[in-house]
Image: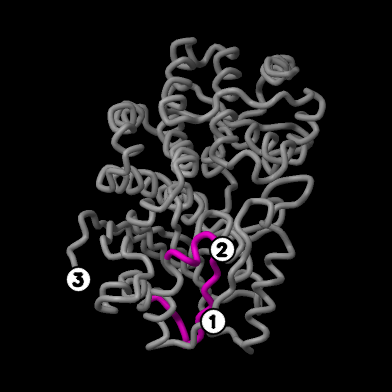
Amino acid sequence: MATPLFHTNLTVKTQSHDYPIVITENSNASRLNNSSGNSTEKSSMASQIAPYIIGRQVLIVTNETVAPLYLNALQKALESQFTVKVCVLPDGEQYKNQSSINQIYDALMVEHFNRDVTLIALGGGVIGDMTGFAAASFMRGVNFIQIPTTLLSQVDSSVGGKTGINHAQGKNMIGAFWQPQMVLADMSTLKTLPARELSAGLAEVIKYALIMDADFLTWLEDNLPAMMALDLAVLGEAVKRCCQYKADIVAQDERESGVRALLNFGHTFGHVIETHEGYGNWLHGEAVAAGMVQAAELSQKLGWLTSEDVVRIKRVLVLVNLPITPPAIDVQTALGLMGHDKKVKHGQIRLILLKSLGEAVLTNDFDAELLTQVLSQHHS
């Protein structure tokens, strides 16, 4: 088996259990489901996750886009040790709902799987969130493993145990905290990622720099072109940094009672866009990008960021083909959608804003008129 070009391990420490994040560039994954060749070359994913599978029963949950790429090789390799079944769901944020969760439950029930089952999430953030929620709720909790295949899920959603589904009136409103047994982020899966999805993932990478590390922002400005060109070693370094930031925050605040909320920078604005425009029409990362600009503009109005800071944020987002202008949404409609946000407390909207580049704060201490101004800037 070829030596991976990039390989590193991190550990996420939580109250329930500690678990590893394995970040690797495994050239064998790029062979996809080619039926010829040595089977060991096609089972790198399987060999790395097998030690973390508890019991003999495995359900792989994936979607119609990812399945043709990686499912066959993973399934065949695991079948030598485990009873493996598959649940293939439609692809898209619009399917992150109760109907899809029921399909996962149905697959588990039909096979008479029990508490010893391990669910494997093979896909992006939608698959990871739904598989994790199914694992959290089936028989009141079974084990699961994350194999994130998009940049967004590798740097963010696969780590930290947030699972759930959307509701028509709000994104991620139904869910549970449920930590995986391990996370395997294979950089070579990014070779098959559409350019638009890569850009959406880079929105979350940029987010970490804006809220936690101004030096990382400078590093990104130098390295984003290489990441856009799919330099897997550079992408691996970025994923490693982001996962370490998130692991540190999750260790402090597993259930988002404090500092973990800072990871939602741009998300309150972004979720308004996703909900209003219809799930899947704007990708999550695209909505977060426009949302981060709105949050930065409000931070500037409060005197925390300079106009140069906001221009710099916009320039970095444009560099990776992300939108910096939200769609036109009526101000009262936007405020109403914000009222469904999970960060609302005692009826007050709380936002993550920037005190400076690399320093974020969760606050409700802002003039509501300034928020209205930001929301109305792009109102048709």
The magenta stretch spans which residues? 52-69
Residue picked out by circle 2: 64
The image quadrant of residue 164 is bottom right
Mark 2 against mark 3, which lies toward the viewer? 2
Q: CA distance from mark 3 to mark 1?
A: 27 Å
| Residue at (74, 45) in percent of width and height | 170
The residue depicted at 77 percent of the width and 29 percent of the height is 335
Q: Secondary structure at mark 3?
A: loop
Percent x, y for residue 152? 47, 47
Q: CA distance from mark 2 to mark 3?
A: 28 Å
Residue 329, numbered circle: none
Amino acid marked by disc 2? Glu
Q: Tell me if residue 67 is in the magenta stretch.
A: yes
Viewer-nearest residue: 58 or 214: 58
Residue position for label 3: 1
Q: Earlier in the sequence, mark 3 or mark 1?
A: 3
Give how far across and how far down residue 46 sits, in percent. 36, 74
* Mark nearer the N terminus (2 vs 3): 3
How busy is the neighbourhood of tag 3: few (under 14 within 10 Å), some, or many (20 plus)? few
Residue 261 in the image: above or below residue 154: above
For residue 142, side relative to residue 271 (left or right): left
Q: Please, what is the three-letter code of the amino acid marked with disc 3?
A: Met
Is 188 or 50 nearer to us in this picture?
188
Q: Which mark is residue 85?
A: 1
Name above or below for residue 61 compared with residue 155. Answer: below
Quadrant where the N terminus sits is: bottom left
Q: Secondary structure at mark 1?
A: strand
Q: Is residue 155 above or below residue 335?
A: below
At a point 46% along the width and 64% down the height, the residue shown is 146
Q: Amino acid at mark 1?
A: Lys
